[in-house]
Image (tube, rainbow, N blue to C red):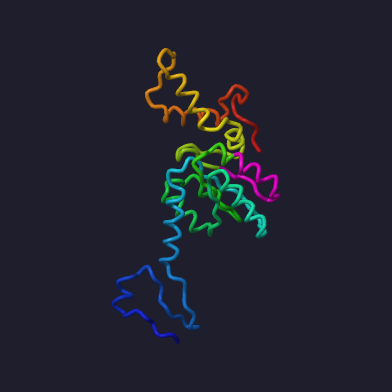
Amino acid sequence: RLTPTMSTAARAAAPSVWSLTTRTGRLRVPRVRKQILVDMMSRKMADRSLVAVAHTGNLTYEQSALLKREVQSAGGSIHVVKNSLLGLGMRNAGLDALVPLLRGKVAVAVGDDEVALAQTLLGASKKVPDFFVLGAVLQSRRVLRHTEVERLAKLPPAEVVYSNLVSQMLPGSVLRVPNPAAHLVALLGHHSSGGDADGGGGGERE
């Protein structure tokens, strides 16, 4: 039996840490480590342009490394975390809509270039057989299904859309938008929902 290094008073003052001894004499994992992980994921997902959940299946080391490189090249990051802890982080970040997608082996990808990240994730599904996007949240407000993520990936880069908007707001132009950023979000949401000319009333359900 191991001798605790914390006094009784100290343990009482730190209820987030489990007892340091067990009947088998093995050390338990401190709860504080889990809370740190939850807080870290919450910060990574909060206020990001796109947060996507993808099914991964059983990834090999090479496939994991490939996904990490691909997502980083799009300015984002991808994380594999225990679903229960990831769900807590999502709720803390206001992404409750994604929690039901946390079933089986999944990963979460986050980034601030929503178009580039969507394109990268869809492209990765062609290189990693069991990898595919289940759903996402755009600009912390709009929930996207897989088919809507596909439409998002077909948009021009965000800076191009923004540049076009700015050019239309120059003196002498007809369009006047008081809040360009808000208008950009609305435009991206419009396209991702199938509101573009060829999207019609929404794509086919899978």
Rendered residue at 67%/45% (across/down): 125
Query: x and y percent of residue 148 in the render?
Result: 58, 35
Vertically, is 156 above or below 168? below
The quadrant in which residue 145 appears is top right
Identify the residue shown where x is 37% and y is 68%: 16
Q: Which span of residues is magenta-colored?
A: 119-135
Quadrant of the image for the C terminus? top right
* Numbered disc total: 0
39 left or right of 193? left
Residue 65 placement: quadrant: bottom right
Above or below for 157 versus 29: above
Q: Position of residue 144 (x, y in %)?
A: 54, 38
Q: Residue 51, position in %: x, y?
A: 51, 44
Q: Quadrant of residue 140?
A: top left
The one of 113 and 88 positioned closer to us in this rendering: 113
Using the image, determine if residue 17 lies above or below residue 161.
below
At x 44%, y 27%, the residue is: 183
In the image, 188 versus 167, the foreground residue is 167
Q: Position of residue 103 (x, y in %)?
A: 58, 53
Q: Quadrant of the N terminus?
A: bottom left
Residue positioned 44% across, 50% down in the render: 91
Residue 121 on the magenta segment: yes
Whether residue 18 is situated above or below residue 43 in the rendered picture? below
Q: Is residue 124 magenta?
A: yes
Could you tell whether 183 is left or right of 78 in the image?
left
